[in-house]
Amino acid sequence: MGDKYAVRVAPSKITLGAAKFKFLVPFYLLLLFVVWNSSSKAPFDGVNIGPVHDITKSKNEAMGAHTILQLKERINAQDGEVDKDTAQSGHDTDLIAEQYDNLMTATPTLERNEDLYGAQSGIDRGEAGEVTPVMERPKDDENEEEQVFARSGYVGNEELVESTRDGADGYDQTTAESDESDRQGNSSPALDSTEGDDQNATVQEVKASIITGDRMTEVNIAAMDIFNEIRANSLPYSIKKTGETAQSCEGKYVFVYDLPSEFNTELINRCDSLFPWFNLCDYFSDSGIGKPVNSMDNGTQIFVPADRWFSTHQYALELISHARIMKYKCRTEDPDLASLFYIPYYGGLDVIRWHFDPNATNENRDALGWKLVRWLENKPSWTRRGGIDHVLVLGKISWDFRRQDSGSWGSRLLEFPDLQKVMRVLIERNPWAKDDIGAPHPTYFHPSSASDIDAWLHHVKRQERTSLVTFVGKERRDDPANVRSALVEQCREAFSEADCRFVECNKNLCQQPAYVIKAFLMTHFCMQPVGDSPTRRSLFDSLIAGCIPVLFHPQTAYLQYPWHLPQNESSWSVYISEDEVRAGRINVIDVLKKISTAERSAMRETIINSIIPGLIYSIPGSDVSPYRDAFDITIDQLLYRSAQGSDLQ
């Protein structure tokens, strides 16, 4: 089904007929004029009128700077959050998307660290005795360029097409203009099936054909190296607390800055105007948890316990984390005692408020960030270590804080020289930034005790899953580069809904949590294609429902969450190359049918027993011991990194 670390090649542009082209040219010229003269809608301005600094970036980070700039985060029209026609009102999103597409580089081709991803085969039995499939990576000793990957349950074509086309600079072609020739000359490796007895074999081993040709670029290798470095310098993955973790505060005190209200509270008070078409006030109530939601759907009990589910917005991470840290048992008011300093600046809300303001300037977009820097510089706790022991939690993706010099979308907060040593926790990290750490998107479930978690896990285990695979989302018919259309077509051509179910997010359907989670509870696998940014909140909604994610892009999860997802990706997910799907060489449903029932059960057991508790955010002030929720994991890892200090710089 393709090498998940292979270079991403977008499909060729649809060729318009001559007559149609002549008709559209004046139309798009007019749209270009309208969009370009609205600073909040044009992705790049001619002049950057905000503070300009000579920022020295690492070479690898600079090369990856434009990898994930696309439409979804540009208009904040998330799946199910807002009707597409409404979101596009006054915003020519097609033109914006095209401009971003022309700047995109390739999706990373990533090399695995052998020490972290050991070459094992067969079955791995953890301490609890659960059986989980293990990925194998044997290597041909005679030729280091030939690598063999084994992925359980992967079946594909029986042909191998070499990747031979390099760009003039020695790297693979990445521009939109070269897409057609790339499509013809570059294919992911084929996969051969090793048949197994479903009754006797827990894992079907399916080996990939040998990869040949130069498919590795400097930037892609660097991205994986950085991710592996983060994991190597982190605490071991665990969703359970130890006795020491649960009791002692020694070396774990956290100081929370008392920032002026303009950095947080006043931004929340703008909840009714952050989006021109969408009121966020109900979603941001109760410290970002949101209002309680209906636990039923058509008379069926979906949520257990019924009173622990809320209308939480995917951008609420800043509010939730702030509320949690204020009630953290090891919070101190003595900065001299602290090992970690928490900066409660709601940078995500700050950047959102300027997205659709037609009068906004880059100076506006950066003003509050610079004011924060000046405020911190007056604190002895900041100057003591230059910010190494400080953390920012941001509820938007990294690219919204890395505006280009000539751009007008987002701020340059994460490019400020003064903040380069600060640790950053975001819902989507920049794969080439070693101080960016991905944290789970907030979901609807917020337990207050371990018994709440146990009740939900039991509910997930006993579900009767009537569909093989489900896709919940929007089709993106107007975006041929997105794999969604191909997935929806395959789903519609399936024999029945028992094979594939497409739950389309029309109007407000997907704003109903019970409707969405019910779909995930009824299916074995959940398709998680990219939107216009690789990550999706839907990934976490499906995981907590025990639905095995089917991923099509390595940056959706594999390069995002080093602290919250296990290393052994094949134990909890399926990967299929989006290029293979778009090209019609892979049918996702056929592939999933070849995964044994036993292996499917083992993957779900891994998700339920080893992943779900670490993805949820419990109610502020509650105790879910012996579990560690997403916040517990994050804060423990931040304290560990802070203790290592300059060794990680």
Image (tube, rainbow, N blue to C red):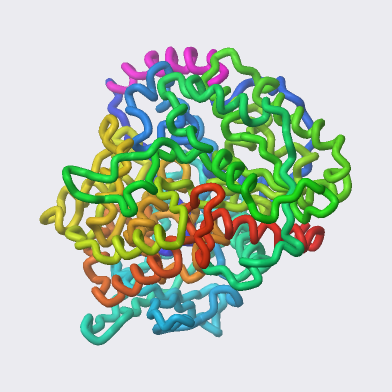
Magenta stretch bounds: 20-40
- Residue drawn at x 63%, y 31% as measured from the top left: 264
Q: Position of residue 143 (x, y in %)?
A: 55, 79
Q: Position of residue 71 (x, y in %)?
A: 45, 34
Q: Is residue 212 magenta?
A: no
Question: Is 629 drawn above or below residue 311 in the view shown?
Answer: below
Q: Is residue 28 magenta?
A: yes
Question: Left or right: 60 with respect to 485?
Answer: right
Question: Is 609 drawn above or below residue 504 in the view shown?
Answer: below
Seen as rendered, the residue at the extreme bottom is 200
Question: Left or right: 466 with respect to 145?
Answer: left
Residue 43 visible, this angle: yes
The picture quadrant where one finds residue 348 is: top right
Q: Position of residue 562 (x, y in %)?
A: 57, 61
Task: Give the total number of marks visible in the rendering.
Answer: 0
For the C terminus, the image quarter is bottom right
**Chief SS of the magenta region:** helix
Question: Left or right: 247 with respect to 3?
Answer: right
- Residue drawn at x 77%, y 52% as measured from the top left: 389
Q: Position of residue 35 (x, y in %)?
A: 49, 17
For the N terminus, the image quarter is bottom left
- Residue drawn at x 41%, y 24% as measured from the top left: 278
Comparing 632 with 177, the one in front is 632
